[in-house]
Amino acid sequence: MRREYRMLIVAVLCLLSGCLTAGAWADETCNSPYMSNLIKGQEDYVHVWTLGVEGLGDGSDKLVTIDANPRSATYGKVINSLSVGGRGEAHHMGFTDDRRYLWAGGLDDSRIYVFDVGSNPARPRLIRTIASLPQQTGYIGPHTFYALPGRMLICALSNTHDKGGVTGLALYNNKGGFISRHPLPTGMVGGVQGDGYGYDVAVNPARNVLLTSSFAGWNNYMRDLPALIKDPAAMKHFGNTMVVWNLKSLQPTQVLSVPGAPLEIRWSLAPGDNWAITATALTSKLWLIAPGKDGSWGAHDVGTIADPAKVPLPVDISITASGKGLWVNTFMDGMTRYFDLTDPWHPQQTYQKHTGSQVNMVSQSWDGKRVYLTSSLLSHWDKTGADNEQFLRAFNWDGHELTPAFEVDFTREKLGRPHHMKFSARAGSSQSLAALVSR
């Protein structure tokens, strides 16, 4: 019965991925497939993990909550701000599988904060701080927080030994208890040399596959960008690989060569699809990860983003629920681009819009009708002067044009530098997979 139940869950996930009627769901497309309590209808809130800025407000990293429901009297306004009492380079966050708790990390101090967003999503509460990641694992810079059943998988960016890019995965239970560490490979795996670098995590449960990508260590990401770019030795210390893991055993099975720091990974959510896509920051390429005829996975350069010679610096990407389209933000030129993925082997850019002097994260609703952008990349990499815009911008998307919906100026509000976003909803606006299965 247990195996049958798991198969049923996978089937439901496939339905959620593309067989529901358009507009029926509004959840983000980048969440773990193990996520329950998917948002049904309009998201009510956008939570923004925000870097503190000295002299701006209280100067602390904070979780900022914005009302995103057009029917609300406070639509487009900040309704809550929860500081953590320090600056640790706030970066990414992720829900637990039950969606009650939001884990968020600091790339500099390596602290992990657990927020209760289930009890009252309009006013999250900080319920736990985990400060033991470096001592328990030897890793620093917790980056991606990815839900597994009853557990949270964290991909770090660096290590305590030399603060370089060699790092690994850390596994915790949902209560914050440490379970195990899993180094990223530095030796030969499947005929390719691993570099040990980490960044993002994404899983395909139906194929028992976990993918990780690679970026750089503390020595690079906490350094001023202009000085870093001018240092040839430092520029050699960026990841050039992706790793294929056995999801159940958390053992690496292949290393794939993907030059130029592959960042966010997005699996196609369409039923029957069996591929993922990523963008490389330094070489401005789209790479397709797909199996060959022999069942082994391969990485394929399938597209170019803008002019790589100008280093537009692709950062975040967001795939549509149908798997037919991809939003790509490029930080240096402040552009948001849309690629048609009808043929994922030959992506075609069909739209672009200048959305800010600097633009980083992008999140879209499941129905694809709303797109949210934030501006900050890293405290030492953000632009200066008039180009140092710090915002969350919300847009409506009709398939042809991004139309501004609302904007929050984080500098004017004295909040800091907005980075990662997650959606939530009021009680009664979400539904679990268990409820769907029981129908």
Image (cartoon, rainbow, N blue to C red):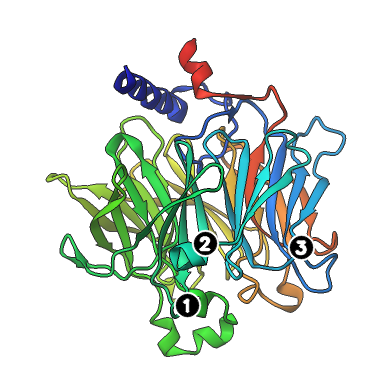
> Are the two marked residues, 1 and 2, in contact with CB atoms closer than 8 angstroms?
no
Q: Quadrant of residue 411?
A: bottom right
x and y percent of residue 354 in the render? 63, 60
Which of the two marks, 2 or 3, is nearer to us in this view?
2
N-terminal of the pair, mark 2 or mark 3, is 3
For residue 39, side relative to residue 282 (left or right): right
Q: Position of residue 407 (x, y in %)?
A: 77, 51
Identify whether 342 is placed above or below 91. Answer: above
Disc 1 packing (10 Å; few <14; some 14–19; many ≥20): some
Q: Which residue is mark 2?
A: 133
Tell me whether circle 2 and circle 3 mark residues in contact (CB < 8 Å): no
Which amino acid type is shown beneath numbered disc 2? Leu
Secondary structure beneath disc 1? loop
Q: Identify the amino acid type marked 3.
A: Gly
Secondary structure category for the residue under label 2: helix
- Give the vertical position of 86 relative to 6 (above or below): below
Q: Position of residue 115 (x, y in %)?
A: 67, 46
Q: Is residue 359 visible?
A: no
Q: Looking at the rendering, which quadrant does residue 309 occupy?
A: bottom left
Disc 1 marks a residue whose amino acid type is Lys
- Specify the quadrant of the image occupied by residue 242: bottom left
The nearer-to-camera label among 1 and 2 is 2
Q: Which residue appears at 38% of the width and 60% of the height?
A: 213
For the question of whether residue 164 can be seen, the reply is yes
Q: Which residue, given by chain and number where applicable, does mark 1 sit on?
A: 163
Identify the mark nearer the N-term, 3 or 1.
Answer: 3
Label 1 – label 2 distance at C-alpha: 14 Å
Q: Which residue is mark 3?
A: 85
**Quick one: quadrant of the N terminus?**
top left
- Residue 119, position as x, y percentages in the image: 72, 33
